[in-house]
Image (cartoon, rainbow, N blue to C red):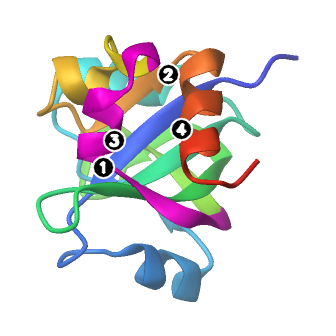
Amino acid sequence: MAINYYIVKQEPTAYSWANFVSDGGTAWTGVRNFQARNNLKAMRKGDRALFYHSVVGKAIVGIAEVKKEAYPDPTDPEWICVDLAPVQELKKPVTLEQIKSHAGLANIGLVKQSRLSVIALTPEEYQIILQLSKSV
């Protein structure tokens, strides 16, 4: 089965990559946008999500894996969440500026829909980001 790829965004002052690693994973709760919710619904166990520090830092800093598929969000059961676990920190964070300046990432949701908190990626976009991070 093919792996799908995503970006999940979080303000590091609220929940950072370091917190995520220390916790060993988390329920990705609090998503209150219909398109982002649809992306959460599409996530399958084993899919990969790039962890993006928004507002402060503005960079992709790590790779997470979907451990549990969509279920009711305990903070509001009308919405859904997934469980994510850390896989690895990127060797070098990939900044928003790098993403915006790379031709292969021109249509990425991070640039086109900057307020979206869960963004689908193509396999090609995922690989470009890993190359920029020196993690492949």
Q: Residues within 10 Å of mark 4 (few under 14, many from 20)?
A: many
69 relative position to 36: left or right: right
Q: Secondary structure at mark 3?
A: helix
Q: Residue at x 30, y 74 (%)?
A: 15
Which residue is labeled 1 in the image?
9
Q: Amino acid at mark 2?
A: Leu
Q: Residue at x 33, y 41 (%)?
A: 98
> Can you give x and y, in whole percent of width and height, for residue 21 in the image?
56, 80
Q: Secondary structure at mark 1?
A: strand
Disc nearer the start of the sequence (4/1)? 1
Q: Are marks 4 and 2 in contact (CB under 8 Å)?
A: yes
Disc nearer the start of the sequence (1/3)? 1
Instruction: Look at discs 4 and 2 and give the one toward the viewer.
Output: 4
Which residue is labeled 4 in the image?
129
Disc nearer the start of the sequence (3/2)? 3
Q: Secondary structure at mark 4?
A: helix
Mark seen at residue 98: 3
Q: Quadrant of residue 93?
A: bottom left
- Taking the magenta stretch, the answer to whether it contains residue 93 is yes
Instruction: Look at discs 4 and 1 and give the one toward the viewer.
Output: 4
Q: Secondary structure at mark 2?
A: strand
Q: Distance from label 4 to label 1 (Cα)? A: 15 Å
Which residue is labeled 2 in the image?
121
The residue lying toward the viewer, choosing from 134 and 83, is 134
Q: Amino acid at mark 1?
A: Lys
Q: Quadrant of the N terminus?
A: top right
